[in-house]
Amino acid sequence: MSKVGKWNEAAEELDAIVASFDGGEVSVDELFAKLERATAIIEELETRLSATEAKVADLTERIATSADEE
């Protein structure tokens, strides 16, 4: 399983996987591999999003504290 790239690239790959399901382009042989890849992408993007949310919350708190000190 290859590593998930940049956010936009990963989202585009996920969109392509979903489109292949919608278009009926996936054979039974490919189904499991594509589902596995889609799951890996989703998990990675969720992890990144959670980390970004935590960083934003931290920065917001630091900005608020700094503004209170002035």
Image (spheres, rainbow, N blue to C red):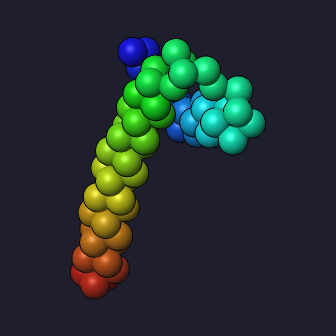
Residue 68 position in % (x across, y down): 28, 84
Q: Position of residue 3 (x, y in %)?
A: 41, 19
In this view, 52 is above or below 20: below
Q: Is residue 3 above or below residue 35?
A: above
Inspect this view and state whether residue 28 appears. yes
54 horizontally vs 33: left or right: left
**Closest to the observer, 63 or 2:** 2
Residue plotted at (46% across, 31% down): 35
Residue 56 occupies quadrant: bottom left
Q: What residue is drawn where x is 61% and y is 32%?
A: 17
- Quick check: 65 left or right of 1? left
Q: x, y (%) of residue 51?
A: 31, 49
Task: Work out which quarter of the rendered image holds the N terminus and state it.
Answer: top left
Residue at (32%, 44%) from the top-left corner? 47
Looking at the picture, tell me which residue is in the foreground, 68 or 25: 25
Q: State which quadrant residue 22 falls in.
A: top right
Nearer-the-camera pick, 31 or 48: 31
